[in-house]
Image (cartoon, rainbow, N blue to C red):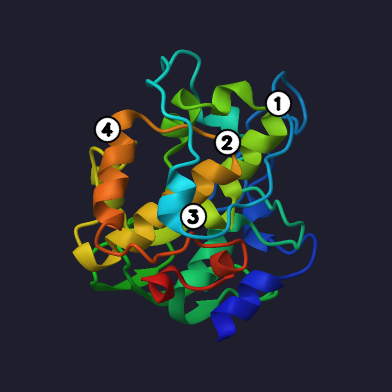
Amino acid sequence: MAAVLVLAGCGVPGSFVDVWAAGPGSATADGGIVESGFTPGEGPGVGAPADPAVGNAVAVLGTLEVKGRAPKTGYARTEFGRRWADIDRDGCDQRNQVLARDMEREVFKAGTHDCVVLTGTLRDAYTGRTISFTRGQGTSERVQIDHVVALSDAWQKGAQQLDATTREQIGNDPLNLIAVDGPTNSRKGDGDAATWLPPDTGYRCAYVARQVAVKAKYDLWVTAAERDAIARVLGSCPDRSVPTDDDALLPAISLR
């Protein structure tokens, strides 16, 4: 599938023509890098995440530590590094890579080496609806990139103890990113599985299994209410496996 190829090798270093045209320290209307004053590797904390989780989602859920939510004190988006950083160093920012992965019939901006997505069609995993995407002010927000484990939730459940480089990985890991309906993503906010699940019940197993995979990969904990909510969903799909990093290269809707 073309979108998968784009994710695996989108562009070449220095290919975000429109991202950098506005100059350092600025944000484009859709994706790109936002200067944050963050330097990868700075800050105290634990090092790189453990190996990605594999196997049955119920079993992996059972390995997660169960604790109360820590205070949100000190949280800021910049604690998770550069927004949509090119963590795989292939020259294409993570927002555009996820758009290309999850959408169909993409049209790319000329001169960006098939990186910057101008238009496409999204089969939304959260609602089951088909959404037409057009890049630009007033239209880009129809499709947003959701952090499956919200960053503030991650912060309150172990990420504040991680180093800055690892937090940047959480913020840009394709396993933790899905292109979804914008208004639905806004309603989710920073909720965990105890407070929010996708409206499309047919995607809930895939959604919570992905949350378990991310939390296991980065050694984040769950609250008791969150664990119980995930367990209830997985009760309807007890054979569900957690998605792997290879699965994260596939369109999110294909993992339902």
Residue 243 versus residue 185 in the image, above or below: below
Q: Is 111 left, or right, of 241 in this rendering?
A: right
Q: Residue at x 41, y 33 (%)?
A: 222
Q: Amino acid at mark 4?
A: Ala
Helix, strand or loop at label 2? It is loop
Q: Amino acid at mark 1?
A: Val
Residues marked 1 and 2 touching at CB (< 8 Å): yes
Residue 26 versus residue 51 in the image, above or below: above
Helix, strand or loop at label 3? It is strand
Q: Is 18 left, or right, of 237 in this rendering?
A: right
Q: Front-most of 251 and 246?
A: 246
Q: Amino acid at mark 3?
A: Leu
Q: Which residue is mark 2?
A: 219
Q: Position of residue 136 (x, y in %)?
A: 42, 61
Q: Nearer the viewer, mark 4 or mark 3?
A: 4
Label for residue 46? Answer: 1
Q: Nearer the viewer, mark 3 or mark 2?
A: 2
Q: Is 4 left, or right, of 61 in this rendering?
A: right
Q: Front-most of 75 and 15?
A: 75
Q: CA distance from mark 3 to mark 1?
A: 23 Å
Q: Front-most of 139 and 104?
A: 104
The mark that comes first in sequence, 3 or 2, is: 3
Residue 145 shows up from this direction: no
The mark that comes first in sequence, 1 or 4, is: 1
Q: Amino acid at mark 2?
A: Asp
Quadrant in which residue 10 is drawn: bottom right
Label 4 crowd bin: few (<14), some (14–19), many (20+), radius 10 Å? some
Q: Which residue is mark 3?
A: 177
The mark that comes first in sequence, 3 or 1, is: 1
Q: Front-most of 99 and 125?
A: 125
Q: If the image is split into quadrants, where does the C terminus sit? A: bottom left
